[in-house]
Amino acid sequence: RLHIWHSHTHTWVLRHCSNDIFLPFLMSSSSGLLSCKRREGGENEKDVLTGEEAEKKEGAADWEKDLEDVRFGIAVKGFQKVVELLNLQPGMTGPEVQAHVKELTKATKLSALKHMKEGGGDFSEVAAYIKDPTIFLSHCWQFTLQDIMESLDELDEDEVVWFDLFTVPQNEDPSKPPKPFSWWSSTFFKNVERIGKVVMVMKPITKPITLTRAWCVFELYACIATKSGFDVAMPAQVRESFLALIRDDHRSFFKTISSVETRKCEAGQPQDKENIARVIAGAGGFGEIDQMVIERLKEWFVRVLEDQVKTSDIVERAAYRHSLGAMCREDGKYDDAEEQLKLALEERKATLGEDHPDTLWTKAWLGQAYSFMWKQKESVAILVECLQKQKEVLGEDHEHTIFTACELGANYGVYLNRFDEGEEMLEDCLERAKRVLGEEHAQTLIIMNNLALTYATSGKADEAKELYLECIERCKEKLGEGHPETLMTMFNLGLFYKAQRAYKEAEAIYYECFQRQREVLGANHDMTLRVMLGLGTVYCEDDEKLEEARQLFEDCLQRMAATKHQEERICRNWLRDCQIRLRMLAPKADVKTEEEEGEESVGEGGSGGGEEERAGEGESE
């Protein structure tokens, strides 16, 4: 249940009690975030919510009444009729709709929907469409009603949407104090929880406005915190462009999420921005919220691709399947990537032919996936065949040809120790990419990373460092600090510093990379766990940080075991050696190895460092 008490001094406190969520998000106009106290003991234990001279019973009753007043939604099939009856124009934005509704309902002080439901007359024909909502509609007030109506066309006509401009009264009752931020935040959160599903209207395709608005991000956070369903709706032309974009370029997703930075979100009222910032800070901080938002958006993006695979004809299906496989590769789900790319390759061979550019493109991505799965033999065989055909069909300067040559060069220079061949191929790729694609193109930056890694592997430290630093600077400027390509290059630079025994520099860049990886890719992503392991190995170089290393290894090992990560055994070895060193340094301390705790035996011996076993090997792209 949600309990609230309101005092004459307008100080509000909310405690939202559920199985695993505590959200202290109501604000005092003078003292900021208020605390909630729990009375302990006895069978009649209660939550005690404090405020200045709180009027408990009356406030609780008022709150329940307020919730009742904003409970209505409008069926999708009746939304346009409501717009017409309210004499609203499709081109109106949120503020214009608010002003119109405010004037219409100034006598009754009701919401637009309740005004129509109780008004009778011409409004009686829409009364049947005003029901309990099944969807909470999250949108920006910059959007027009036309944007909203076109987005609703994606939904089932019997769905009922909670639309704030129609559902919430736009006139204040002069007999009551003004509604504070706490009322709005609690109303939105409670309705998200009650309804159980949020649909976010999103536009444009890249860097959507919705993800830059504080209230929209708050609503998405409420969706996550209450374990509600989530989906995205778009105006017709925006959705058409979006589907075409993700069919041809799965990396458009990363352009979409690049705008997710809750710390920088704006609100129409500066005080709302500050209050929402306090809510987020109290619920785990901006980084944690960013991670939750990005993860939910990623789930939605993959679901859209899967739906298109199921519903498209074979040619379109192969294209969407290719994007789905490539997205799985980016997400560290290599087995799924292999499966989808193999199916896409067969579909494209059947419909387009073996030498078609799209078929060769899928083959190149499959070769890259094998490289990430440590299947270098299969990877090289596919890439060599693919590269030869692409040179014949597309020419050496085509972007796809450059991509394949880059992947093959990385295999030679990084994984197979064929340094001369790898360097020659990657240097040629870099020259072509700069000339054809431009120095700041994403593919150019990927080649720079792979060439720097090859230099580092072959012992050319000065060349490697110079190229790494240039690549990271350009990646951050062009792609963004949280882009996977940026993070990959940072990871490799951290490895380079560690190999050069520059532990201070290695720790700094590993730590930054680790924080970003968790936000963008998630705590259990393949690359996040590799960075986590790498950071722990750097901590091990400092006896004073061994305890931090131990905690990091234990967390990392647990996550690796759950995901069957390839480097689980290496992490286990590092943890064991870290425990032994802690015991040696503090004999009386209660530090036990896994064997002493009765956990699984390590098995193979050798130094926990295990770097000879690929721990900390760089990643090519």
Image: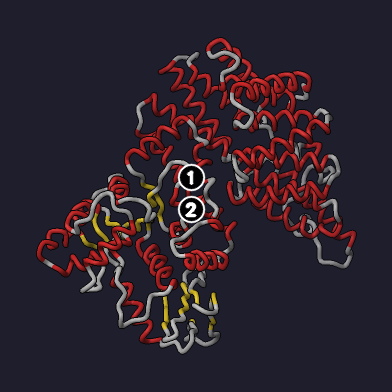
The residue tagged 2 is 212
Residue extending farthest bottom: 53
Location of mark 1 (residue): 207
Residue 7 in the image, given as x and y percentages of width and height = 42, 85
- Quadrant of the image containing the C terminus: top right
Q: Secondary structure at mark 1?
A: loop
Residue 565, image x, y percentages: 65, 43
Asked which secondary structure carries label 2, the reply is: helix
Residue depicted at x 54% and y 75%: 33
How many numbered marks does the figure carry? Answer: 2
Q: Quadrant of residue 177?
A: bottom left
Residue 185 rendering spot, x and y as whole percentages: 43, 68
Is residue 501 among the parts visible in the rendering?
yes
Q: Position of residue 401 (x, y in %)?
A: 59, 19
Left or right of 519 on screen, residue 129: left
Q: Is residue 151 left or right of residue 242?
A: left
The foreground one among 480 and 312 is 480
Q: Residue at x 41, y 37 (%)?
A: 242
**Which of 288/427 is in front?**
427
Amino acid type shown at disc 1 = Lys
**What colour scheme was applied to this rendering of the protein?**
secondary structure
Label 2 Cα neighbours within 10 Å, binned few <14 / some 14-19 / many ≥20: many
